[in-house]
Amino acid sequence: MAHSKRNTSLPHFTAYERSLLRTTWGTQRTRLSRESFLPFSSCRLCLLPARSPVVACATNGDLFCRECAVNDLLAQRKEIKRLEKERELAERDREEGEGRLAEEARERELREFELVSMGLEERKRRLDIDRDRGGEDGNPNGEAARKRRKGFELDEKTMRNIAQEEREKIRKEIERERQAGQAGTIMPRLHS
């Protein structure tokens, strides 16, 4: 047991540790004296004798100075207004962020559409050049040209559905990219 006296793992303090506590942190025991209690007619906010006292609760006997009570209520109202402004700003920022996200999704969709249409335009130009030259068999109005140009029709409703799905995919992709970029940051949220 002699080897473990200094490792401070005892379940109780040694005399030396108690003396350190007394010298460093003061006494372990204190007595509540008259100074520890609030005098009878003192304000609960400013702790001074109440000037023009107001009783807030008849059963508990909470006593306040009228001036302190009004100041406290005004401070609370000011704090509530500040919190409401912060909440409105956060709400506005969130809406602007959603708007920016939608705009970014539209721009990305437009870019991808332009890239695809450029590729299709190149293919269409090649087909036109081949047809002008006479096609595969030298006949511009031949059967080979007709086979290449099969009609593909889409109605407006299908196009809207496809466009909406594409926008959602792009929006989700942008959100994933942003979350990957913000993996280490913590964003506080204000609840309404």
Image (tube, grey):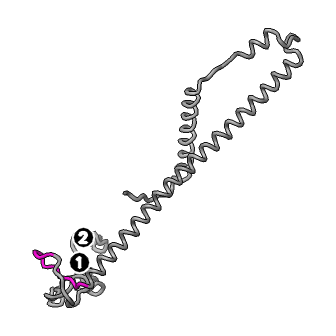
The residue located at (74%, 28%) in the rendering is 120
Query: Extreme front residue here?
Result: 156
For the question of whether residue 19 can be seen, the reply is: no
Query: Over which residues does the magenta segment extend?
Result: 57-66
Residue 171 higher or lower than 48, as above or below: above
On screen, residue 185 above or below 116: below
Mark 1 to mark 2: distance in Å?
8 Å
Query: Residue 76, how many percent across, how many down?
Result: 32, 73
Q: Residue at x 37, y 72 (%)?
A: 79
Residue 190 against residue 150 in the figure, above or below: below
Which quadrant would the C terminus be assigned to in this image? bottom left
Name of the residue lying farthest toward the top: 143
Residue 60 is a magenta residue: yes
Of helix, strand and loop, which one carries label 2?
A: loop
Judge by depth and name the residue closer to the eye, 14 or 57: 57
The tag on residue 10 is 2
Question: What kind of residue is marked 2?
Answer: Leu
Disc 1: CA contacts within 10 A as few (<14), some (14-19) or many (>=20): few
Q: Residue furthest left?
A: 59
Disc 2 packing (10 Å; few <14; some 14–19; many ≥20): few
Residue 51 appears in which quarter of the rendering?
A: bottom left
Please tell me whether residue 122 is drawn above or below residue 111 in the rendered image: above
> Taking the image as drawn, is residue 101 in sight?
yes
Q: Is residue 187 left or right of residue 61?
A: right
Please state if 75 lies on the left or on the right of 10 as rendered: right
Tag 1: amino acid: Thr
Residue indicated by mark 1? 14
Q: Residue 16's x, y, as percent?
A: 26, 82
Where residue 171 appears, as percent x and y from the top left, is: 55, 42
